[in-house]
Image (cartoon, rainbow, N blue to C red):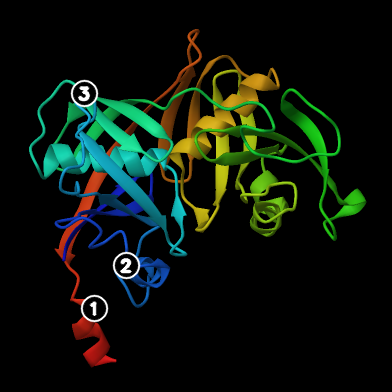
Amino acid sequence: MRFYKFQACGNDFLVIRESVPGWLTERGPAFFERLCDRHFGVGADGVEVLVAKRPGEEVDPGVDASIRLFNADGGETPISGNGTRCVGAYLTLVEGWRGSSIRIATKAGLRELRPVSQTKRAVLFETMMGRPGLTPEEIPVRLPQRLDRVIDQPLRVEGWGEGETVRVTSVSMGNPHCTLFLEGDDAFARVDWRGLGARLERHEAFPDRTNVEFVRVLDRGKIEVRFWERGCGETLSSGTGACAAALASMLTGQTEHEVTVQTVAGELRVEWRADGTVWQTGEARLVFSGEWPPEEQLDQED
């Protein structure tokens, strides 16, 4: 099985084109977990599968590629902004796509990628990330009080620090997100954000679990973020997470509607336009490619 490893701001994915319908997508969680394992597999935050069409399945003329995403824990999730960008880079660099845009169907809907610049190993894309879900039902999140939007709301976290309450802002970017704001130059060293992220991911307020972003606002046009991803844990960056963090900063009045998101491994640009759509500009880069042995061969080795 041929795979290609890409990374976008350090968020890494294996991109694989399925040759036969269901041959890869029906392998089950254990297969994807093994593939993503950084010690016993290839190593990745997730696997993006370009799905094969079944005989007689209608082809949508408005779609250039259809994908399914499997996290490092083996579970399927609707979308990754960075992962979708990695698929766009794969189609451009490996398969030679030369259109003015690439329309990729995800489980969270259609995403349009427009190439801005290209080198031999990387592509810079402007990506239409869709309209955010802002109501509790769209996210989803369950809080005691009825709210139109979840902005700077108190949330009790059992066994967590003084008062056991944090303040969260939540949105959906096709997947659920929960954002918290930290203050101080040493905020990420002073706060155990990884421990808190793990607790919030599985908090009872989020029936589908949640991705968690920790944000330090630098000025009206720039924020710094750390990411705890549902099904992956700590990641160096997140495309949808960067959008959610930027939106939370905008919704709480701390930034303008176009911001630079500084991650551990690079920067992303996020804009919330007047028509309600969110656009993100960022790079995706080829790391390496290789062959994964057939499962029967792995079983024999075991």
* Residue on which disc 2 sits: 27
28 horizontally vs 273: left or right: left
Q: Residue 189 location in percent, x, y?
A: 66, 52
Which amino acid, mark 2?
A: Arg
Q: Nearer the viewer, residue 112 or 285?
A: 112
- Residue type indicated by callout 1: Glu
User: Can you identify the residue that label 3 sits on?
Assistant: 101
Residue 48 badge:
none
User: Closer to the observer: label 3 or label 1?
Assistant: 1
Instruction: Quadrant for residue 133, please give it.
Output: top right
Residue at 40% x, 72% y is 30
- Give the mark toward the camera: 3 or 2: 2
Residue drawn at x 58%, y 25% as measured from the top left:
247
Residue closest to the far front: 56
Query: Looking at the image, which residue is at 36% across and 60% down?
Result: 44
Q: Which residue is mark 1?
A: 295
Question: Closer to the N terminus: mark 3 or mark 1?
Answer: 3
Q: Tell me where residue 253 appears, x and y as whole percent.
A: 69, 17
SS for dot 2: loop
User: Could you tell me how far apart the alpha carbons at marks 3 and 1 are, in whole angstroms?
Assistant: 36 Å
Cβ atoms at labels 2 and 1 below 8 Å apart: yes
Question: Would you call the spot at circle 3 few (<14 residues within 10 Å), some (14-19), or many (20 or more)?
Answer: some
Q: Earlier in the sequence, mark 2 or mark 1?
A: 2
Question: Residue 233: x, y in percent?
Answer: 54, 58
Query: Quarter holding the N terminus?
Result: bottom left
Task: In the rendered view, tell whether residue 76 sits above or below residue 53.
Answer: below
The image quadrant of residue 267 is top left
Decide which of tag 3 and tag 2 comes sooner along the chain: 2
In the rendered image, the vertical position of residue 207 relative to residue 32, given as above or below: above
Question: For the C terminus, which image quadrant?
Answer: bottom left
- In the displayed structure, 28 sits above or below 214; it is below
Instruction: Give how far apart the Cα atoms at labels 3 and 2 are.
Output: 31 Å
